[in-house]
Amino acid sequence: MEKKFLAAIAVVAWFALIGQFYLQFNSGVAPKAELLVRFFSYFTIQSNLLIAIASTSVSLFSNTIFGEFFKKHTTKTALTVYILVVALVYNVVLRFLWTFTGWGALVNELLHVVVPLLFLIYWCSFVVKRFLKWSNLWWWLCYPLVYCIVVMLRGNYSGFYPYPFLNIDKLGLQNVLVNCLAVTALFAILSILFIAIGKWQAKKIGH
């Protein structure tokens, strides 16, 4: 049942990613090489891509190096945190900034609502949580931190920032750093919540 559920997530995630790639790559708003870089500069795309790779690896190639890595409860929980941050930031902060129609609207909802919801259901239903440790938090925060640094450095060079709240040119460095701290706090809060759930389950089983 677990592998079938992951396979379904993989199908949805790959469909959304390929659809979004096609739409963006053919948008004509920038040279093809730049559009390619921009596509992979979105945390939404990176997180959904990790979900797609993880779901495919565990459901079809569980005995490979990738399968073994993505089968880890810590890896699955980190991915759940990342994709939930995508959903929360988009639906609370960014949803009303852009309007999508047709296929764009469909893939947008898949990337920001459907995949996050499906993977959260997967985490709640199948992931072993009782072995999570508080120290996992610091490792999980490394990826978002590196992402912010890379995006801001490239934005300073290219003038393109994937998200408005990271735009140093318009907001200034101080405001962007405040925004980064706020998003980091969201990552940390979700991580602490998930680890706490794991600790609660371990205590419950122990009794």
Image: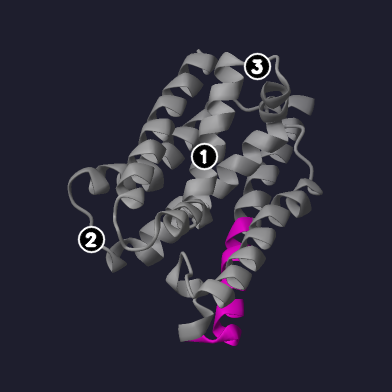
Lateral position of residue 32 relative to residue 23, left or right: right
Check disc 2 and give the amino acid type.
Answer: Thr
| Residue 93 place in picture, x, y as percent | 39, 66
Label 3 neighbourhood size at 10 Å, few (<14), some (14-19), many (20+)? some
Badge 1 vs badge 2, beta-carbon distance below 8 Å? no
Residue that label 2 marks: 99
Number of marks drawn: 3
Display coloring = one colour
Where disc 2 sits, the SS reads loop
Residue 172 lies within the magenta run: yes
Residue that label 3 marks: 62
Q: Quadrant for residue 35, please give it.
A: bottom left
Residue that label 1 marks: 49
Where disc 3 sits, the SS reads loop
Above or below for 179 versus 201: below
As measured in the structure, the alpha-carbon distance from the residue carrying label 1 to the one carrying label 2 is: 23 Å
**Does residue 167 appear anywhere in the picture?**
yes
| Residue 106 place in picture, x, y as percent | 26, 42
Prevailing SS of the magenta stretch: helix
**Does residue 124 appear anywhere in the picture?**
no
Check disc 1 and give the amino acid type.
Answer: Leu
Camera-nearest residue between 188 and 26: 26
Give the mark nearer the N terminus: 1 vs 2.
1
As measured in the structure, the alpha-carbon distance from the residue carrying label 3 to the one carrying label 1 is: 18 Å
Where disc 1 sits, the SS reads helix
Camera-nearest residue between 122 and 94: 94
Camera-nearest residue between 187 and 12: 12
Stretch of the chain drawn in magenta: 171-187
